[in-house]
Image (cartoon, grey):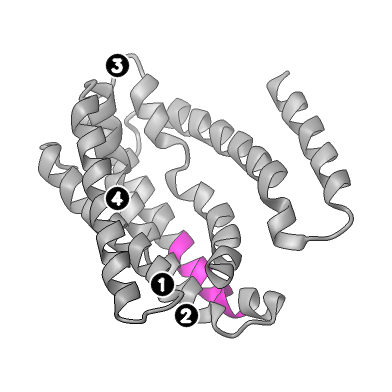
Amino acid sequence: YGLFGMALSIVGLIGLFKDMGLSLATVQKDKINHEQVSTLFWVNVLVSTAIMLITMALAPVIASFYKEPKLIGITLALASGFIFGGLTTQHQALLNRQMKFTVVASIDLLSIGLGFASGVISALYGAGYWTLVIMQLVTAVTNVVSVWVMCRWRPGLPVWKSGIRSMLSFGGNLVLFQILVYNSVYIQKLTNCYYYRFSKLITQFLVLLFLV
């Protein structure tokens, strides 16, 4: 679990950008059309792909930071999961917007269940720390397949002048807030240094400033 936790603490921080806050932007919008959702879908896919590639490029840096070569493979595997998030963000947002909460909960349970089952099987076959990585990827793949089956909406070509600027702005503000909160909660996992308390105080100040 230690190796997985090391990689996840940094990958999780980078992963805050994959959604770009556009899921909630779609849910809270009073009126939204097919062109807007399609454009946001492709934005999510492009951002997720970019984040996946950036994280993969940073894998050696993360391994060097922790002085643990095994983190390269773990980071590469976890990074590949970003693209799955980009493929489902808008579909899940539409299901929530349509208040199909039972469907969303069922998808979550199925994904977690299959992920857990894959973890148990992997552990029995001696996969070691890769068990947790396999669980993550199986959960993500199951989620993608289930969401696309249950949500009949399919994206069209992006229309960049479809009026999504306000939604992008909303999403950007949400991501900033999430980063500040993440830093406050998990910065100690990244550094374990004495300046943790000072960093937390600064973060709390920035959160209050952001809210004002």
Which residue: 80% across, 42% down?
200
The part of the chain drawn in magenta is 51-60
Q: What is the x, y in percent for residue 80?
A: 38, 67
In front: label 4 or label 3: 4
Alpha carbon of mark 1 to alpha carbon of mark 3: how far? 38 Å
Which residue: 30% across, 32% down?
93
**Residue bearing the label numbered 3:** 31
In front: label 2 or label 3: 2
Judging from the image, what secondary structure is the residue with disc 3 in? Answer: loop
Whether residue 43 is visible, yes or no, is yes
**Residue bearing the label numbered 2:** 73
Alpha carbon of mark 4 to alpha carbon of mark 2: how far? 23 Å
Decide which of tag 4 and tag 2 comes sooner along the chain: 2
The relative height of residue 26 versus residue 41 in the rendered view (above or below) is: above
Q: Are marks 1 and 2 in contact (CB under 8 Å)?
A: yes
**Residue bearing the label numbered 1:** 77
Q: Nearer the viewer, residue 71 or 156?
A: 71
Decide which of tag 2 and tag 3 comes sooner along the chain: 3
Neighbourhood count class around disc 4 (C-alpha, 10 Å): few under 14, some 14–19, many 20 upward: some
Q: What is the x, y in percent for residue 12?
A: 54, 55
Q: Which mark is residue 54?
A: none
Q: Are marks 1 and 3 in contact (CB under 8 Å)?
A: no
Locate residue 66 relative to residue 205 in the image: left or right.
Answer: left
**Residue bearing the label numbered 4:** 112
